Each structure stands twice: as structure tokens, then as C-alpha cells.
């Protein structure tokens, strides 16, 4: 009888234990992965400063380099100054060369020639004329010069240039010269503007040829 009761109690205890065990919820366990390491969290985005230079603003382009157009190795030639007129020497002051050559053909006795300007004029009384015809009847046999000018005949032999004129004494200079009726006669002329010229007759004044042809060279003082 006692054994039967004890057996019933054991049976009841076993049932209670089984019921309690089945009623408890299962405990979750974290899965383990021995082969794959835990992932590293991503780095935060960089913080862009809002003070100072703005890296997002484009930098302005540098201005183009200025290329000099001046050639320092071979500078452009400088233009010669333009001569200015001088009221006292209107033609000489505008000359760009120290020496000038010329030729006059068929100058009639009533004509004159301005060696300073290289101008032929008529009548012969025009101011500034350096040479003109002088009539001695019955033919035109000499040259005359205007106020301010002087003439001097050079020897037939010897140089016919400025140095020969400069070597002449003051007594050799006059207002007129004779003997211009043949080729080769050379005459020094001190012009109205104080220059020196040498004229050489190529066709002289004669009764049959009443026109004078000559060449000349003038040196501007």
C-alpha cells in the first residue's frame, strides 16, 4: 500500500517537471561565424570648411602674357628731322644735303638764276638771283650778281672747286665778270645766302649764240 502511494507521487512529480520544461521559451543564442570577420563601419564624409578660400569656386585664368613688339636688337630707323625755313636763308635752311649739282640750258640775257634755290626767273631784277646777263654793246659779254652776291673768275688751269674759291683774295671778288663767251670758263659765286658755288660754262654767250648753258655745284654753308 505504501509503495503504491510512493509510486504515484513519483509519477506526479515527473509529469510536473515535464510540463514546466515544455512551457519555458527557448533562449536565443547569437550565431557564430568563425570564418567571416565583423564588417568595419564606413568612414564619415569629409567636412568642407566654409571659411577662407572656397575650393569649389574656380580660380580665374591668368591674363595672357604681353609680347613686346619693339625690336631692341634692330630698332627701326629714326626719320631725319624736317629742315625748318630760316627767313634770312629761306632756301639753304631747307636743304637736306650739303652739296647739290645742277645744269641750266639756254638762259637768255634777260633771265637770272637763283643758285641757292635752284630756280630760274625772269626778269633778272627778281631779288635773290645770283647770276644774270650783263649787256655790253654789241653783245652780252659778262655776268652780274644781285645785292649780297659776289663773282670771281677762276684761272683756266687748276682745280675748279670750293677750295679754289676759298683761296681767292677779297680783291678777286666783284659784282660782275667778263669773258664768258667760251666753254670751260669757271666762275666762283658767293650767293645771296652766303653759300659758295662754282659754275662752268658749256656754251657761252656770243652774237651768234645769245643763250648761256652751264653746269654748277653749290656747297651749303
Image (tube, grey):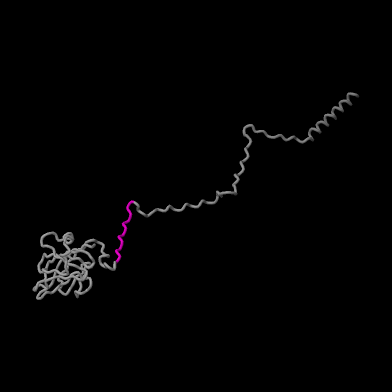
Task: Tell which of 35 and 159 is nearer to you.
Answer: 159
Task: Tell which of 115 and 50 is nearer to you.
Answer: 115
Q: Is residue 144 left or right of 40 when viewed as pictured?
A: left
Residue 86 image point, x, y percent? 29, 66
80 within the magenta span: yes
193 within the magenta span: no
Q: Is residue 28 left or right of 220 when viewed as pictured?
A: right
Task: Tell which of 150 and 101 is nearer to you.
Answer: 150
169 w.r.t. 210: above or below: above
Q: Residue at coordinates 33% horizontally, 54% vertically from top-left?
A: 75
Quadrant in which residue 91 is drawn: bottom left
Residue 133 image point, x, y percent? 15, 72
Residue 150 image point, x, y percent? 18, 67
Please state, as top left, top right, bottom left or bottom right, where the N terminus lies in the image: top right
Q: Residue at coordinates 42% horizontally, 53% vertically from top-left?
A: 66
Task: Point out the residue furthest to the right here.
Answer: 1
Magenta region, residue range: 73-85
Q: Residue at coordinates 23% horizontally, 72% vertically from top-left?
A: 127
Task: Point out the residue furthest to the left here.
Answer: 208
Q: How many marks?
A: 0
Q: Name the main secondary structure of what is drawn in magenta.
A: loop
Task: Point out the residue furthest to the front here.
Answer: 171
Please state, as top left, top right, bottom left or bottom right, where the C terminus lies in the image: bottom left
Quadrant in which residue 106 is drawn: bottom left
30 w.r.t. 156: above or below: above
Residue 208 image point, x, y percent? 8, 73
Amino acid at each position: 500500500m505504501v509503495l503504491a502511494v510512493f509510486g504515484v507521487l513519483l509519477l506526479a512529480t515527473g509529469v510536473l517537471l515535464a510540463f514546466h520544461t515544455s512551457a519555458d521559451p527557448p533562449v536565443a543564442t547569437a550565431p557564430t561565424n568563425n570564418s567571416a570577420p565583423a564588417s568595419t563601419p564606413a568612414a564619415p564624409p569629409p567636412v568642407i570648411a566654409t571659411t577662407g578660400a572656397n575650393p569649389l569656386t574656380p580660380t580665374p585664368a591668368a591674363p595672357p602674357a604681353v609680347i613686346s613688339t619693339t625690336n631692341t636688337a634692330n630698332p627701326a630707323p629714326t626719320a631725319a628731322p624736317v629742315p625748318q625755313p630760316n627767313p634770312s636763308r629761306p632756301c639753304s635752311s631747307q636743304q637736306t644735303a650739303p652739296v647739290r649739282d645742277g645744269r641750266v640750258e639756254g638762259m637768255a640775257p634777260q633771265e637770272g638764276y637763283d643758285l641757292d634755290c635752284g630756280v630760274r626767273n625772269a626778269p633778272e631784277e627778281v631779288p635773290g638771283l645770283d647770276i644774270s646777263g650783263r649787256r655790253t654793246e654789241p653783245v652780252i659779254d659778262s655776268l652780274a650778281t644781285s645785292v649780297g652776291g659776289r663773282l670771281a673768275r677762276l684761272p683756266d688751269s687748276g682745280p675748279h672747286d670750293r677750295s679754289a674759291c676759298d683761296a681767292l683774295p677779297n680783291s678777286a671778288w666783284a659784282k660782275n665778270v667778263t669773258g664768258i663767251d667760251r666753254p670751260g670758263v669757271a666762275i666762283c659765286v658767293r650767293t645771296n645766302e652766303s653759300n659758295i658755288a662754282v659754275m662752268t660754262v658749256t656754251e657761252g654767250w656770243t652774237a651768234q649764240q645769245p643763250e648761256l648753258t652751264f653746269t654748277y655745284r653749290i656747297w651749303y654753308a
